[in-house]
Image (cartoon, grey):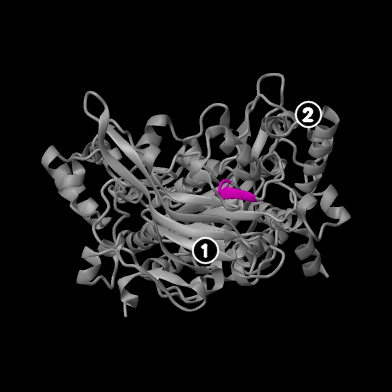
């Protein structure tokens, strides 16, 4: 087992809801509620869940792009919450973010060369020749044509733009990358190109990924461990294969059975979830999933289940596994 | 006419100003939709699947237009009509009554300024002569059919009160309230989460049975196709490259593009290195080569593919494919 690189402990992020005439806080959106996990070096940990379950907020809270309400994040042994903004800024050289939508994340008025040089000029003191060399290296690494460096983002297709965004995130040679839905804006045939690229770069540059996605197929391919989120909480976490082959939490079971079948001849028994995800501004008492759960018991309405770890680090938060 | 809809030789032109020649975004598309059939159209973004369906609804506007050579014959309640030859007011009488449409993003397709009830009533008051009370009853019954809880309360709500899945149910209610013969669903579940997507697909399958409606399902997700459709047409760069009955398409795939698509989806589920991918990107409209439009990404490309365009030919009964490989295999 590799050394732990990122350790998230009891991370909580609330957003205030402003209301009334003087715009004071009238409530809170419980976006991330007591999330803990750790990521080892050169490992991919994925957060998977439906929209609004707090997976992106978790990713951003770790990088302190959103200030977490409480909880601690350790990066390579340093507690990030104690760092001053200036120290944090220097730390970000080692931790980068790839955004979901390559159509919105690249400045349309900057050429590719300038987009790639920008992180270098922020984080490193480099001469122009050194910068040129770095830009040259990363362009090749992500499979862009060096002749296209003086073009602008609008001249590229979605897949190419995502390559530029990846190059921009990796040019400072970070150890840890948060990839927030990096392929969901792309077409299927392009998705696999980008996923292959991310996996190749991980091997080459010894990266650790926090991979955020709602696509269960993609997550299965890329990650070694996953955490399933529901309404701000991790409800199940474990090795990817054990979560996919023996899902324990009723929500994970329903989520996996909702994937459309790959073959029309396949017959598949569905677990149907009724209703919608409750609002995170007013989360239900007890287990967050109890009002949609088929095996809900009285205890589920009252108390939040504790973590139960079964074999091989497969952890579930559900009263069904109380002993 | 033994089909509900017969589209012949659809071509859609993009006007680019007086000095530039028009670009054809779609070409030579023939579709036959049978009564009560669930027809799937699958393809990547920009392959022309949405504009094909907008042309059926007569929703294309400047700078797009349907080429005069096209005919779209539709078996309406008043007999057979050619949708491309109808006047605007004749088209309005068909749109929303005999052909209706569900859009991709229910959050933006509904008007935020009106209640759910008045948006359902809009479809009713235009096409029927019901009074206010009767419309209320009809709207209520329709919301129950699409399984919306507390329908009487939801009727007086505004779109921002509802979640995406609920809004998509409202959209389906509006589309089906006049009992249309053809329903066009343009990526109806793309904006929704998987668990909600499964609910909506189930609902659509159920309603199709009870309403005897034909459905054209546009999507980029082969899983959704496998879940719902009987016939499938695969679009690539403004053309149909393969069309077959669903099991045939998945098990006797003929076109290299469809093979690649299927492979890149199914290889996602399996842990085999590396992930299968189709190299390159979709060519842009107006810059198509005169050969096969897929040739530069195709693994089996030959000299002939570069220079001349293959025709859509039958490779097995009811199975059409646009590829030189299959045509040569058949001739030999």
Are the two marked residues, 2 and 1, in contact with CB atoms closer than 8 angstroms? no
Q: Nearer the viewer, residue B272 or A137?
A: A137
- Answer left or right for A302 relative to A78: left
Q: Is residue A10 visible?
A: yes
Point out the tag, 2 or 1, that comes first from the N-terminus.
2
Q: Residue furthest right?
A: B303
Identify the image quadrant of residue A241. Answer: bottom right
Q: Secondary structure at mark 1?
A: strand
Which residue position is annotated with label 2? Answer: A150
Question: Chain for mark 1?
Answer: A
Magenta residues? A176-185
**Whole-percent x and y of residue B30?**
59, 51
Which residue position is annotated with label 1? Answer: A226
Identify the image quadrant of residue A239. Answer: bottom right
- Answer left or right for A174 relative to A259: right
Picture residue at 60% right of the left edge, 44% below the top: A98
Picture residue at 49% right of the left edge, 55% below the top: A8
Q: Secondary structure at mark 2?
A: loop
Q: CA distance from mark 2 to mark 1?
A: 39 Å
Q: Is residue A101 magenta?
A: no
**Whole-percent x and y of residue B177?**
27, 48
């Amino acid at each position: 087992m590799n050394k732990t690189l990122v350790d998230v402990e009891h991370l909580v992020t609330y957003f205030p809801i402003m209301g009334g005439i003087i715009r004071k806080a009238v409530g809170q959106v419980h976006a991330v509620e007591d999330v803990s996990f750790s990521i080892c070096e050169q490992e991919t940990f994925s957060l998977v869940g439906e929209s609004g379950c707090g997976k992106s907020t978790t990713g951003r809270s770790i990088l302190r792009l959103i200030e977490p309400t409480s909880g601690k994040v350790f990066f390579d042994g340093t507690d990030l919450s104690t760092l001053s903004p200036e120290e944090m800024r220097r730390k970000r050289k080692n931790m980068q973010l790839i955004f979901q939508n390559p159509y919105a994340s690249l400045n349309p008025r900057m050429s590719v060369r300038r987009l790639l040089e920008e992180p270098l000029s922020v984080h490193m003191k480099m001469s122009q020749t050194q910068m040129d060399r770095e830009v040259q290296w990363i362009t090749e690494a992500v499979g862009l044509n060096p002749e296209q460096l003086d073009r602008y983002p609008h001249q590229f297709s979605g897949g190419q733009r995502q390559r530029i965004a990846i190059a921009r995130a990796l040019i400072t040679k970070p150890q840890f990358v948060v990839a927030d839905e990096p392929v969901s804006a792309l077409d299927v045939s392009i998705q696999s190109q980008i996923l292959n690229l991310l996996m190749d770069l991980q091997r080459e540059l010894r990266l650790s990924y926090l991979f955020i996605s709602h696509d269960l197929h993609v997550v299965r391919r890329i990650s070694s461990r996953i955490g399933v989120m529901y309404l701000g909480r991790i409800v199940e976490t474990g090795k990817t294969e054990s979560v996919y082959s023996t899902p324990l939490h009723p929500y994970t079971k329903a989520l996996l059975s909702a994937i459309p079948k790959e073959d029309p001849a396949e017959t598949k028994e569905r677990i149907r979830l009724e209703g919608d995800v409750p609002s995170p501004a007013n989360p239900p008492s007890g287990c967050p999933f109890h009002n949609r759960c088929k095996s809900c018991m009285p205890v589920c309405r009252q108390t939040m289940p504790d973590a139960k770890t079964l074999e091989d680090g497969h952890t579930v938060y559900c009263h069904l596994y109380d002993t | 006419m033994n089909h509900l809809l017969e589209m012949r030789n659809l071509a859609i032109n993009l006007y680019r100003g007086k000095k530039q020649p028009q670009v054809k975004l779609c070409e030579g598309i023939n579709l036959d939709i049978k009564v009560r059939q669930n027809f799937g159209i699958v393809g990547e973004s920009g392959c022309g699947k949405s504009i094909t369906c907008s042309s059926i609804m007569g929703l294309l506007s400047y700078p797009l237009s349907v080429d005069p050579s096209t005919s779209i014959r539709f078996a309406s309640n008043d007999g057979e009509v050619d949708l491309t030859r109808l006047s605007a007011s004749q088209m309005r009488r068909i749109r929303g009554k005999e052909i209706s449409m569900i859009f991709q993003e229910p959050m933006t397709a509904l008007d935020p300024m009106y209640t759910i009830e008045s948006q359902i009533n809009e479809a009713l008051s235009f096409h029927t002569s019901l009074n206010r009370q009767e419309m209320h009853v009809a709207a209520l019954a329709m919301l129950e059919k699409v399984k919306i809880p507390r329908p009487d309360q939801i009727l007086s709500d505004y779109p921002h009160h509802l979640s995406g899945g609920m809004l998509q149910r409202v959209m389906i209610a509006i589309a089906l309230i006049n009992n249309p013969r053809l329903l066009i669903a343009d990526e109806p579940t793309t904006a929704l989460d998987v668990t909600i997507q499964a609910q909506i697909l189930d609902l659509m399958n159920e309603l199709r049975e009870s309403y005897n409606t034909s459905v054209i399902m546009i999507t980029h997700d082969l899983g959704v196709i496998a879940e719902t459709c009987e016939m499938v047409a695969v679009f690539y760069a403004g053309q149909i490259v393969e069309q077959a009955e669903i099991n045939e398409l998945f098990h006797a795939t003929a076109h290299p593009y469809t093979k690649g698509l299927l492979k890149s989806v199914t290889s996602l589920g399996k842990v085999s290195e590396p992930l299968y991918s189709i190299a390159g990107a979709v060519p842009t409209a107006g810059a198509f080569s005169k050969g096969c439009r897929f040739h530069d990404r195709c693994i089996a490309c030959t000299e002939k593919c570069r220079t001349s365009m293959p025709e859509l030919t039958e490779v097995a009964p009811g199975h059409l494919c646009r590829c030189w490989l299959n045509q040569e295999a058949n001739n030999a």
